[in-house]
Image (spheres, rainbow, N blue to C red):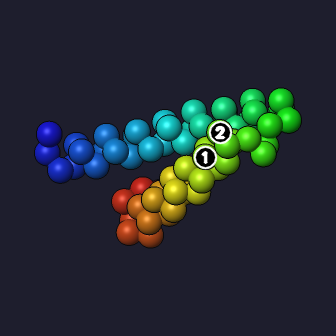
Amino acid sequence: MDRLAAFEQMLSDIQKQSEEERAQMEALKAAGKEKSATYRQYFGNRVLYRTILELYRKYGLID
């Protein structure tokens, strides 16, 4: 796998994981479990994903 393909795969994986965890967070929130360890872990992950995606935007790698 070349470097560009690896970047594209990483970007795709981060976006997919972010969306999946967002959906899980919504389900946990609907069940009133915003204080659960799982919800908090998803929240932390989403902050990390957002930071990574913002760095990609900063350097003009994504829109």
Crowding near pointer 2: few (<14 within 10 Å), some, many (20+)? some
Q: Nearer the viewer, residue 34 or 5?
A: 34
Q: Return the residue at label 2.
A: 38
Q: Where's the N terminus, which quadrant?
A: top left
Q: Position of residue 62 (x, y in %)?
A: 42, 56
Q: Is residue 47 left or right of residue 63?
A: right
- State the residue at coordinates (79%, 43%): 34
Image quadrant of residue 33?
top right
Q: Return the residue at label 1.
A: 41
Q: Position of residue 55 (x, y in %)?
A: 44, 66
The amino acid pointed to by label 2 is: Thr
The amino acid pointed to by label 1 is: Gln
Crowding near pointer 1: few (<14 within 10 Å), some, many (20+)? few
Q: Nearer the viewer, residue 37 or 26?
A: 37
Q: Does residue 46 appear in this view? A: no
- State the residue at coordinates (38%, 69%): 59
Q: Position of residue 5 (x, y in %)?
A: 22, 43
- State the residue at coordinates (41%, 61%): 56
Q: Does residue 10 appear in this view? A: yes
The disc at residue 55 is: none
Q: Is residue 39 left or right of residue 61?
A: right
Q: Is residue 22 left or right of residue 2?
A: right
Q: Regarding mark 2 in the picture, which secondary structure is present there?
A: helix
- State the residue at coordinates (24%, 45%): 6
Q: CA distance from mark 1 to mark 2?
A: 5 Å
Image quadrant of residue 32?
top right
Image quadrant of residue 60?
bottom left
Q: Are marks 1 and 2 in contact (CB under 8 Å)?
A: yes
